[in-house]
Image: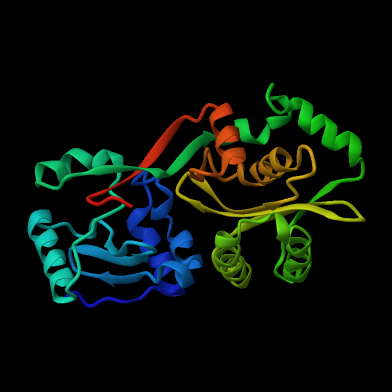
Amino acid sequence: MINFHKFNFLDCKKLKTFLDEKNLFLYEYNPYWIFTNASFYKPEICFGNEYVFIRYNLPGTGKVYYPPIKNQGGNLEMTLLEMAEDANELEIPFYLGPIPEGDRRLYESLSYSVLKNDNLSTYIFNMSELSNLALNKNYKSDIKTFNKMHKDVFLKKVKKEDFTQIIEFISTIRDKQDELEFYPKINELKECMDHLYELDLIGVLLLDEKQTYGFAVGSLMDNCFYYHLMFYDSEVVGALPMLISALAKYAQAFSRFAAMPAHKGKKELIDLYESLKPLRIENYNGNFNV
């Protein structure tokens, strides 16, 4: 049986050393995302001599194993059999995912039927484009309207002591949030703010002296910046593109690309992502249906 332990803060940066420079844009491979969502997905990890193993709980599905992440390298086929045996000892199916798009053929050659999950995907953008949404023909008008209606708005780089202000803002838009996602997001927010400096997270507030219009926070891995959380007033015209662009302006000094998770059902975000013409879309693949 693989000697898993509960994924913790120290594992976060250790795992990052195995993932840097692998160009794994898929959102679920971001160690900071795994850590800040630990209360929801219950991830476990094991740093083996040849591979790093991760398993987690996927709501509605059960325990799922990440494909083994190469450490020193070894026999992948034998390692997968070892993982299957671990699942067998737990008396659960051996579910494997997310499988990176580039590894799809490899797993199919090992007789794994790889299925694409259309409900989970990661959109990859050029960071410079996001930082200049005010010039984008689809959002120029909305951003112009926002600036006209809120002439005193400014950006503030988030500090730990801003947590209370963020919670107060979120409470004002509480009735506009998806009930099923709200509490996991609050837990993720708490982890982000508790470890803001330790994880080198970058966050911004969009506000004026009277009210707050949006908050966003994300993390850097290799040459890509990952948007983790975005809270905004959906009734304020231009608030969402302003917020996305605001965070990009801070993050572009450190990254060339931006990654955003997308879930079917979030029409406003999907419409925005697709109108920006992403550089690529990373699909969540697995040997099971979600």
| Point 75% across, 49% down: residue | 233
* Quarter residue 4 falls in: bottom left
Residue 44 rendering spot, x and y as whole percentages: 33, 72
Relative to 160, say whether 30 is above or below. Answer: above
Classify 89 as above or below 29. below
Where's residue 218, x and y in %?
58, 54
Residue 66 or 237: which is nearer the viewer? 237
Q: How many marks?
A: 0
Horizontal and vertical percent position of residue 13: 43, 65
Q: Note whether residue 200 is visible.
A: no
Q: In which quarter of the image is the N terminus?
A: bottom left
Residue 210 shown left or right of residue 108 in the figure: right
Q: Is residue 82 left or right of residue 6?
A: left
The quarter of the picture where residue 188 lies is bottom right
- Horizontally, residue 98 falls left or right of residue 175, namely left
Q: In this view, does 22 lie to the left or right of 109?
A: right
Any part of residue 158 in sight: yes
Q: Is residue 164 above or below residue 143?
A: below
Residue at 16% in and 65% down: 83
Q: Nearer the viewer, residue 288 or 42?
A: 288
Residue 99 drawn at (x, y percent): 28, 48
Q: What residue is drawn where x is 55% and y is 61%?
A: 180
Task: Give the colour scheme of this rendering.
Answer: rainbow
Question: Quick one: 30 or 150, which is closer to the camera?
Answer: 150
From this viewpoint, which residue is outermost toward the top?
137
